[in-house]
Amino acid sequence: MPVAQELHPPEGARPDWTIDQDWAAYTQAEHDLWRELYGAQSTFLADRACGAFLAGLEALDLNCEGVPNLARVNAQLLPLTGWTVVAAPGLVPDEIFFEHLANRRFPAGRFLRRPDQLDYLEAPDIFHDVFGHVPMLTNRVFADYMQAYGEGGLRALGRGRLHNLARLYWHTVEFGLLETPEGLRIYGAGIASSRAESVYALDDPRPDRLAFDIERVMRTPYRIDDFQETYFVV
């Protein structure tokens, strides 16, 4: 999700705010932590995530080498939907973020959360970005939606409607739910990458779960510091 608004990329980043992943620099402890996160969440989501998400996990095999090597991920993802994942130093400016999406590139943070941040952290890390987001990019419908979102975001910047596009992203890409013949299922990355929110989004009686309506979505604020008060169901 775009948030950073610095005009110039940080030191070491290219003009488009991408960096080398430098996969060899990940420590054994980080690889072990990835395996712990992946094993727990992939098992937990087996009957909670939508079929497209689970199929994406299987297609990409994101746990075969610890922290995923984006070069290997891209070799599998590109032939499926034309998308690639690029490493970024963190959150990127809105215009840069939309430009990447419009060209079927997904920026992913390089760093991995600490062991004391297993279920929540403020800035998206590589587990949130790659485990949470990338499986859905193997699905052609969702992949096309993400490209269209990037193109729409670039238009929204020039029309002063960025807040509407931010709400759309939040309530679909990050925290969207899907009604299926098997029941309510998760497809949003913010839910999929969090065990606690995976339980809350589907099982807790407190949040509203509303049928998706794009105008209402664009009018509905969201929480960045707690579980959501409202989920929209496609």
Image (cartoon, rainbow, N blue to C red):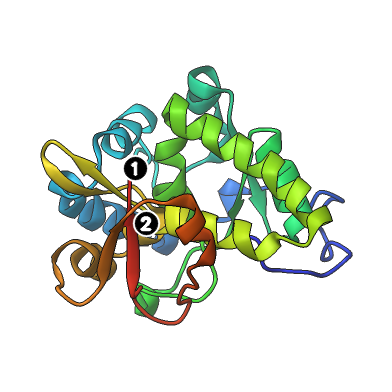
177 left or right, relative to 101 = left
Observer-nearest of 111 and 84? 84
Callout count? 2
Amino acid found under the numbered disc labelled 1: Asn
User: Crowding near pointer 2: few (<14 within 10 Å), some, many (20+)?
Assistant: many
SS at badge 2: helix
SS at badge 1: loop
Residue at position x 43%, y 61% from top? 30
For disc 2, the marked residue is 34
Q: CB atoms at circles 2 and 1 under 8 Å apart?
A: yes
- The reply to whether residue 13 is in sight is no
Observer-nearest of 145 and 24? 145
Q: Where's residue 135, x and y in %?
A: 40, 38
Amino acid found under the numbered disc labelled 2: Trp
Label whose residue precedes the other's in the sequence (2 or 1): 2
36 left or right, relative to 182 = right
58 left or right, relative to 101 = left
Q: CA distance from mark 2 to mark 1?
A: 8 Å
Residue at position x 46%, y 25% from top? 140
Observer-nearest of 70 and 77? 77
Q: Where's residue 39, x and y in %?
A: 23, 52
Q: Where's residue 205, x and y in %?
A: 14, 73
User: Crowding near pointer 1: few (<14 within 10 Å), some, many (20+)?
Assistant: many
Q: Where's residue 38, x and y in %?
A: 30, 52
Q: Is residue 107 above or below residue 8?
A: above
Residue at position x 48%, y 68% from top? 220
For disc 1, the marked residue is 63
Q: Is residue 151 above or below residue 196?
A: above
Residue that extends furthest to the top in the rendered view of this protein:
79
